[in-house]
Amino acid sequence: MWIEEKINGYKQSYEVVETIEEKESSFQKIAVHQTKDFGKMMSIDGCGMFCEKDAFIYHEMMVHTALCSHPLVEKVLVIGGGDGGCANELLKYPDVEVDFVEIDEAVCEMSKKHFPEFSDVWNADNINLKIEDGVEFVKKTIDNTYDIVLIDSTDPIKHAKALFDKEFYENVSRILKPNGVCVAQGESYWMEKETQKKILSNMYDSFKIIMPYKFEMYSYPGVLWNFIFMSQKYHPTADLILDKSDLLDGLKYYNSDIHRACFALPTNIKKEYADIIKI
Amino acid sequence: MWIEEKINGYKQSYEVVETIEEKESSFQKIAVHQTKDFGKMMSIDGCGMFCEKDAFIYHEMMVHTALCSHPLVEKVLVIGGGDGGCANELLKYPDVEVDFVEIDEAVCEMSKKHFPEFSDVWNADNINLKIEDGVEFVKKTIDNTYDIVLIDSTDPIKHAKALFDKEFYENVSRILKPNGVCVAQGESYWMEKETQKKILSNMYDSFKIIMPYKFEMYSYPGVLWNFIFMSQKYHPTADLILDKSDLLDGLKYYNSDIHRACFALPTNIKKEYADIIKI
């Protein structure tokens, strides 16, 4: 059996040795498969979310790119990321307090059971897991609460759609401190360019710096994917804090060279995006 | 119909609207297909070589990364690249003389017919096309002939295999001037790591600087692919010549940010490759 992801006339497929567990929650269909070459893979509604082979790229590139662009991080909000991978990466900063808001408890349960590499998250004193809707959570949160907000969501469909709306970004900007930083899953400027352009336009009025950056995920169609860095003050390359970035222990992907490099944009994207990004 | 590329438990596929032409040469089976989303695609022995959507990334990243790392380029050798894409990119440097050595005339013929965007190559005064074996060509070439050698080959199989041998790199190093630069198609540190490690080991004794760098190709399995930069003197990032790099007209992908960024290596690759690359 093969898990297949298809975008128009392009397909990416992974050979599955065994589907270990499938669960239908109130929000989505979650499954964990044993693949032939990529270790265990979690899929949601048939789309690969992450696999053992490449999950570290996603989590390191989301978390450390944000935290190493900010000099003093005390309070972080993670929206989504129910697998625990991003929260787990945040444990490398022991003084940081994390609010971790996931809408679907079933994702956490599946991860707890099948991805023990993230297991420290579930009992960590500085991680406060809240099972609720991220959109409602940011609405009710008071101004200037967080140094960092990480939006680790699925694609902009179903319940995740509102996590890409203009109103949502306005709220994220409001609950960040004035020097806060936000990083969001941002689709891809290759495979999902029109979707990404719409997302960037929705962010536009809420932040002074808006920059897509690049990472690779074998379980995403087209492999090349983007996060979006947003802030009012800190610039991700000019304000990169080398003391943090190069002293992080036990990382497999992220380093300060990669941090600087991931923000380089191809000429055609730079031109096409001139009016929707803020470098 | 779909063109499918499979590496173990991973597959990448492209929907084909029509196969425009197929030709069996003495070396390989060449085909040109109209794909649904990626424009026309040339395949060799069933493997995607390039398509209209992404060819510019490959050609710009091979040619300009080499030429913008060298202050005075007069003579360039292109081995392979029978489609003409790299040679076409070299036309942006009108004072450069190019020897263009392709083993299989049928590749040139197919490209002439179906990829008119490279058509200037076939009549350019400063491009000398020679239909012969690149391995034999470098053997018989005298020392210190070229400023740049570009090895635009298929995978290390069949007639292309000898283009990845230790002896071949020794000859390339010998026919380069002492400050010469070589860039070679170098497989991938994700999908073809063991092959790439072998290639890097074969290069090791012939060059003082050996650095893999990254680009994306939708028609290659795993998308993320590498060229290898080799030289005795110039360092691709320390010696980058901004005057050249930022004044190149009409490029779609390459710019000086991308040039610097493409050499950043993930931490795990940096560690694993410590003894086979020379930074």
Image: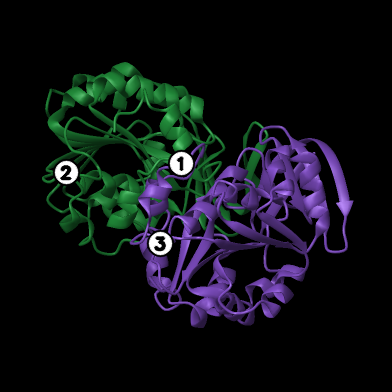
Chain colours: A green, B purple
**Compared with residue A132, is residue A97 higher up or lower down, i.e. above or below?**
below
Q: Residue A155, percent across and down?
A: 46, 31
Res. A183 mark: none
Q: Does label 2 or label 1 sit earlier along the sequence?
A: 2
Q: Which residue is mark 2?
A: A70
B72 and A192: which is toward the camera: B72
Q: Secondary structure at mark 2?
A: loop
Whether residue B153 is visible here, answered yes or no, is no
Q: Which residue is mark 3?
A: B236
Write the residue at 58% across / 43% down. Answer: B56
Q: On the rendered image, what quadrant is the C terminus of chain A found in?
A: top left
B277 and B254: which is toward the camera: B254
Res. A225 mark: 1
Dot 3: chain letter? B
Write the residue at 32% across / 54% down. Answer: A119
Q: Secondary structure at mark 1?
A: strand
Spatial CA distance of label 3 from label 1 is: 26 Å
**Compared with residue B225, is residue B212 higher up or lower down, i.e. above or below?**
below
Marks 2 and 1 close (CB-CB < 8 Å): no
